[in-house]
Amino acid sequence: ESQLNPNYNFDNFLEGDSNRLARSAGLAVANKPGGTSFNPLLIFGGVGLGKTHLAHAIGVDIKDKYPEKTVLYISAEKFTQQYIESVKKNTRNDFIHFYQLIDVLIIDDVQFFSGKSGTQDVFFHIFNHLHQNGKQVILTSDKAPVDMQDIEQRLLSRFKWGLSAELQTPDYETRISILKNKLYRDGVDMPEDIIEYVAKNIKSNVRELEGAIISLIAQSSFNKREVTIELATQIVEKFVKNTKREVSIDYIQKVVSDYFQMDVATLQSKTRKRHIVQARQLAMFFAKKFTKASLASIGSQIGKRDHATVLHACKTVDNLAETDKQFRKHLEDLTKKLSQ
Ligand code: ADP
Ligand code: MG
């Protein structure tokens, strides 16, 4: 079982300036898996920009051209679970052996390996084996290797061996072609001004773009509603609101330091000055609240503190919010800014 999804292929991965490099590199790898200098090929970019789609497309294309090759797609999360399971069952060697026999290994969302040293270690050995034997490794991540946190140096340096290709937010032209392609495939007609309205208003995420057009298609074909700009406006608004933007810890630190008129380095510094300590504690509190990062990962990203410091910060913020009116105001202001 390759776990590949044939619906994610190159034909329906539309090309634009925002993805040309990554797409071409993917095609090159698919033509000669293990035989290019793009090994590993690391595709990185924000949420909903097509990393998973492109990763599958490469695998699907390889399977097409080289049916005898074993291609495996797996999320970093599932890989981690399998590894933990193997340790429990005392089958760690079988786990390693299984992965070392694969010709093309695709691991999605490797940022999930952050802070997981056992998994990183086992992946390091599998990676080396595959690479030495001319096998292809394809990885995706939400960040470039230079920005990855809590990944061992030796693994990061492997990530940088091949090519890191970014998927950027699609420009207007690409957004239009993605929408038109979707409509064409579904056999639906939509007025040009509606398509343009959607493409103009949903900019940062292809998944949202698709979601909005799917809603519009559903409204027009199942509810028999006329697709007007008013309807498009309602749907676009709902989409942009419903899909809560994932805020990053970097972004939180930026917003908090801007608010207190200091720079991020000051916020992270070792100083014990009260207002700086409070800013830092607020940043930790929001990182806990608005991201999925672990306490340890939050601490290491906000001035190299440990998880206990983060936990303490969150408690302090809760306490101060109850007892200190001025502080509560800061908390409310910042919550508003970060929820926008
Ligand atoms: P990510 O893994 O980066 O979060 P996905 O690969 O899940 O993003 O993509 C989100 C959605 O957007 C998917 O339905 C995917 O098919 C679609 N998509 C992304 N980029 C493109 C593209 N260039 N052309 C067509 N569809 C795309
Ligand atoms: Mg994905």
Image: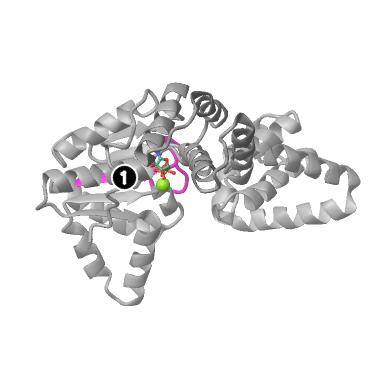
When asked about the image quadrant of residue 274, the answer is: top right
308 relative to 240, above or below: below
Q: Secondary structure at mark 1?
A: loop
Q: Is residue 86 visible?
A: yes
Disc 1 target residue? 8
Outermost bottom residue: 89
| Magenta span contains residue 138 | yes
On screen, residue 161 versus residue 110, left or right, reads left
On screen, residue 305 versus residue 277, left or right, reads left
Which residue is located at x 59 percent, y 54 percent?
A: 306
On screen, residue 258 versus residue 138, left or right, reads right
Task: Name the spot of residue 180 as percent of width and height, x first.
Answer: 41, 30
**Quadrant occupied by the C terminus:** top right
Q: Which residues are magenta?
A: 135-153
Cβ at disc 1 under 8 Å from ligand 1: yes
| Magenta span contains residue 258 | no
Q: Nearer the viewer, residue 2 or 123?
A: 2
Task: Name the spot of residue 249 as percent of width and height, x first.
Answer: 59, 42
